[in-house]
């Protein structure tokens, strides 16, 4: 059994309205030191696979097919 931790983030060229709104709210709270905010997703998956290579292939397929929009988002996978 493998635990996959996936971070999905917007590509740098994509506008992030949630990040912009959060940045504005932080400035309103007096946290002017924060210069930029980008919002992403964190996903954990338990994968039943015989080896790390097979587990990674399953997680990459899940990301490509459902968890991430590859036109707008990038993803990073960490397996334990």
Image: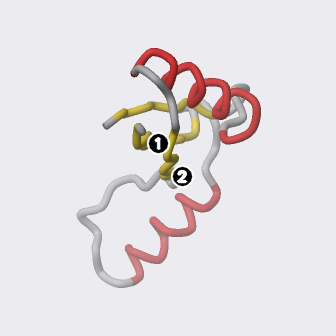
Tag 2 near tag 1, CB within 8 Å: yes
Q: Where is residue 24 drawn, in percent x and y?
A: 48, 70
Q: Is residue 3 above or below residue 51?
A: below
Q: Residue furthest top?
A: 53
Q: Residue furthest bottom?
A: 29
Q: Secondary structure at mark 2?
A: strand
Label located before the other in sequence (2 or 1): 1
Looking at the image, which residue is at 56% across and 31% down? 59
Q: Where is residue 58 drawn, in percent x and y?
A: 60, 26
Q: Is residue 36 above or below residue 71?
A: below
Looking at the image, which residue is at 51% across and 18% down? 54
Visual colour scheme: secondary structure
Q: Quadrant of the N terminus?
A: top left
Q: CA distance from mark 2 to mark 1?
A: 6 Å
Q: Residue furthest left?
A: 33
Q: Is residue 71 left or right of residue 54?
A: right
The residue indicated by pointer 2 is 41
Q: Is residue 30 left or right of residue 2?
A: left
Q: Residue 53 lies in what quarter of the image?
A: top left
Camera-side residue of 16 and 5: 5
Q: Is residue 67 above or below residue 63?
A: below
Q: Is residue 60 left or right of residue 35?
A: right
Q: Which of the labelled discs sits on residue 7, or is there none?
A: 1
Camera-side residue of 5 and 33: 5
Looking at the image, which residue is at 66% across and 33% down? 62
Classed neighbour count for the residue bearing mark 2: other residues with Cα under 10 Å, few (<14), some (14–19), many (≥20):
few
Q: Secondary structure at mark 1?
A: strand
């Amino acid at each position: 059994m493998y635990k996959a931790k996936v971070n999905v983030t917007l590509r740098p060229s994509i506008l992030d309205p949630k990040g912009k709104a959060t940045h504005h709210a932080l400035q309103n709270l007096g946290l002017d030191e924060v210069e930029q905010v980008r919002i992403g997703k964190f996903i954990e998956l338990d994968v039943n696979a015989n080896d790390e290579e097979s587990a990674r292939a399953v997680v990459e397929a899940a990301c490509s097919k459902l968890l991430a929009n590859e036109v707008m988002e990038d993803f990073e996978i960490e397996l334990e």
